Image: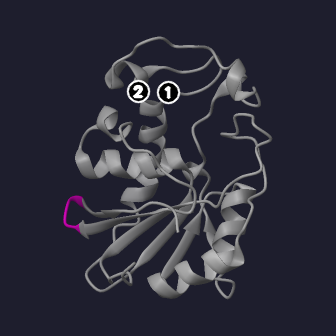
Amino acid sequence: MQPLKPNELAVIRHAPADTGGRLAGRRDVAARIDPQAAAYMARALGQPARLICSPALRCRQTAEALWPKLVPEQDARLWEQDFGTHEGLAYEDLPDLGPLSRAELAQVAAPEGESFAQMVARVTPALAGLQVPTGGGPVVVVAHAGTVRAALAMALGDVPLALAFEVAPLSVTRLRCFAGGFSVVQVSGDV
């Protein structure tokens, strides 16, 4: 893992969460922090100029474990996708959607929830506002798998294509900021 560069935005998925085998998009569950993995990641990435996180407990705990001397800014737009009435269901009890294209899947919303496309629309202004001017970063966001995919959708210019990415807990997605957008520098697995 290379140190972050001043013109990078890094989006880190929170550490593994204590979900109890149930869907936890907006459910506020704790993270299971591995102090050695967090220390390794923080040393490898270096100190960010700004640290922002989702208000979710698992994200705040991860940000604090990575950089305990920094107080992360919280942005509610970075919350995970709202799974509505499916929140808290055991994974095996989730409805089978059948075969869907990525474009169709991006539009699916659970009752009283939001689709991935709606989540991307919510997250995009938050991430676009973090574009790092030359030499003004790096900026780190600690959030959710859906937030990471939203960042990839922005960089790729394609919402459904971002659903092709699997996002491991405590993985780092690095984006280079340039006038008018992002490019993908690296998508890494877990530490």
Residue 148 is a magenta residue: no
Can residue 180 be seen?
yes
Vertically, is 139 above or below 147? below
- From this viewpoint, which residue is outermost toward the left? 179
Which range of residues does the magenta coloring cover?
A: 178-182
Q: Quadrant of residue 135?
A: bottom left
Mark 2 crowd level (few <14, some 14–19, many ≥20, 10 Å Cα)? many
- At numbered mark 1, what does the secondary structure look like: helix, strand or loop? loop
Disc 1 marks which residue?
115
Expressed as whole percent of the image width and height from the top left, the position of residue 189 reads: 45, 60
Please report the residue visible at 63 percent of the width from the left and 29 percent of the height from the top.
83
Nearest the viewer among 115 and 180 is 115
Vertically, is 94 above or below 73? above
Dominant SS of magenta comes to: strand
Expressed as whole percent of the image width and height from the top left, the position of residue 146 reads: 50, 44
Q: Where does the N terminus fall, quadrant-wise?
A: bottom left
Q: Tell me the amino acid under the disc marked 1.
A: Ser
Q: CA distance from mark 1 to mark 2?
A: 6 Å
The answer to whether the residues at label 1 and label 2 have Cβ atoms under 8 Å apart is yes
Disc 2 marks which residue?
106
Q: Tell me the amino acid under the disc marked 2.
A: Ala
Residue 180 is a magenta residue: yes
Expressed as whole percent of the image width and height from the top left, the position of residue 132 reads: 33, 74
Q: Is residue 31 left or right of residue 63?
A: right
Can residue 47 be seen?
no
| Upstream in sequence: badge 1 or badge 2 | 2
Q: Quadrant of residue 187?
A: bottom left
Expressed as whole percent of the image width and height from the top left, the position of residue 4 reads: 38, 81
Please report the residue visible at 55 percent of the width from the left and 52 percent of the height from the top.
78
Q: Is residue 18 left or right of residue 161?
A: right
